[in-house]
Image (tube, rainbow, N blue to C red):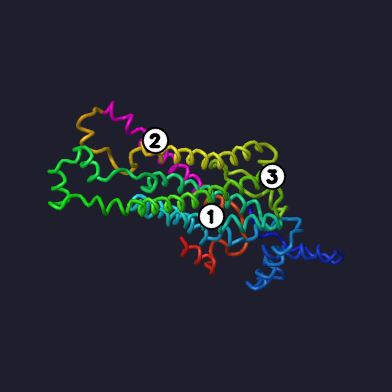
Amino acid sequence: MTCKSSIPFPASNNTTLQEQLNQTLWQLFSLHANGNTASLGDTLFLSSIYCSMDSATQCYGICPNADLAGVGVRTAFWISSILQAILVAISPEDSTQGAWTAAVLTASVIIPAIIQKRQGNLSIYHATLVLNFASFASLVSLAVAPMCTVWRQGPTEEDALRTSDNGNPIIEVALYGEEGSPESDEDQLTNLPKRKVHRERLMLSLALLTQVALQWTWVAILFTDPNYCQKACVPETIVLLFGFPLSVHELNRKYYALWLLWLLFNLSITLIWGTVLVHSSSPSVHPILSRQPSRVDLSLTWRDRFPLDKGRLLVLSMNSLAFLLAVLLLVSSELQVTRNCLLGGENFDWSFGQIAALLVA
């Protein structure tokens, strides 16, 4: 898409009011009527008129929608997902908070996008960016979720030693002193940690399901509703699919199947990594961020150890692939921003909503 920055201002005296407004909008990009430069106030006024009506016959640029794709919103998504991955790697016990932060950010763009789509106020440029945001956040959340310790509660080192030695008095003295194991107190508190674990699992599952449900809903809307605002700008809008820039006109004429594959690809992301999460949550899968105990390593060769670690290795390999896909979505989104002509200060203004999005992240 090219910005029309030097098109002369057309004048006409025999047109309707709507046509006069459409012609006046040329001043947004020429700004040289009668040799005088238009003021910033005139530019903002004309831009507001252009973006408030959806009947322009020529595209002067994509109207801003900072609530969905402002610089603060985009930065919040990238930072939130990166911090979530770091949090899970450093402190897997606190992963629920990061998952809910990502779920809140996803809902904060998907829900307004659905409302604007129903009202006919959403451009295809912003619709595709919202899909990238939702897929990026869902992918990161599902990829790091198997590393959370809440999914499995293996025996502690003390329990393992006590079980392996069948209650050896020497081991009990070494662990608990001469008073012995506090079995009575442990039995009384058995249900408390179980309730806490179940509650944490429920909260984390709800956060992940919220993200996946919102992303799938948005994909379904894009598949079933092809109508977007700013119809004059739709053919020239550049979207990046699988890293390749294509205009919407090219998609409609030559590569419509690629658009369907892109939507299917976004659905497959959450489906595949959701399946990996279910598989890796089994108690038989060793914790992702730790190695097998050394006492097992001494007695087994690597051929014997591989079946024991195949679940963990699967998650690590899938996380490497998820990292590459996340980079693809991030780079594609930012390149799409630079390849299109945007009006207003969507990429520069730091309003209340942009700062609030960063603070939530």
Pointer 1 residue:
106
Residue sitting nearer the eye, 73 or 342: 73
Q: Position of residue 176 (x, y in %)?
A: 17, 51
Between the C-alphas of marks 2 and 1, the distance is 27 Å
Q: Residues within 10 Å of mark 1 (few under 14, many from 20)?
A: many
Q: Which residues are magenta?
A: 302-331
Q: Is residue 314 magenta-colored?
A: yes
User: Tag 1's secondary structure?
Assistant: helix
Q: How many marks?
A: 3
Pointer 3 residue:
224
Q: Amino acid at mark 1?
A: Thr
Between the C-alphas of marks 2 and 3, the distance is 35 Å
Q: Is tag 1's residue or tag 3's residue first in the polypeptide sequence?
A: 1
Q: Main secondary structure of the magenta part?
A: helix
Mark 1 and mark 3 in contact? Answer it, CB < 8 Å: no
Residue at point 43% right, 50% down? 201
